[in-house]
Image: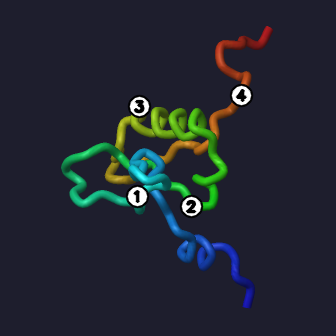
Amino acid sequence: MASGGLTKWFKQDWVNIGSPKKGGGYNKCGRRSAKKGKYPKCVPAAKAARMSKSQVKSAVRRKRAKKQGVGGRPTNVKTFARRGSRGRKKS
């Protein structure tokens, strides 16, 4: 049986890149209470380890800038922002 897709997704170690640990690394994904606290930006631990500080900061900022829970559904944002498309107009 192939180990990919949803099976692989569930087996990955998901971390909240908006919540770094003091000794390094990140806390596990999720919140204790959905009523308080900042919204988590969760990615697989392997991806978090490859991200630069500025990429982490950008992803967390974009996630928290969006209105959360619209229509009772979680809000997703891309982990990596597109480059070079801001502010340009097609002529």
Residue at 20% over, 47% down: 36
Cα separation between marks 1 and 4? 28 Å
Q: Which residue is under mark 3?
A: 65
Q: Pointer 4: residues within 10 angstroms few (<14), some, or many (20+)? A: few
Q: Residue furthest bottom?
A: 1
Q: Is residue 45 above or below residue 58?
A: below
The tag on residue 27 is 1
Q: Pointer 1: residues within 10 angstroms few (<14), some, or many (20+)? A: some
Give the left or right position of residue 17, taking residue 35 as reference: right
Residue at 52% over, 69% down: 13
The tag on residue 44 is 2
Q: Secondary structure at mark 2?
A: strand
Asked if the residues shown at circle 3 and circle 1 are in contact, with their CB atoms under 8 angstroms apart, the answer is no
Which one is in front, 49 or 39? 49
Q: Position of residue 2 (x, y in %)?
A: 74, 85
Q: Position of residue 54 (x, y in %)?
A: 58, 33
Asked if the residues shown at circle 2 and circle 4 are in contact, with their CB atoms under 8 angstroms apart, the answer is no
Cα separation between marks 3 and 4? 18 Å
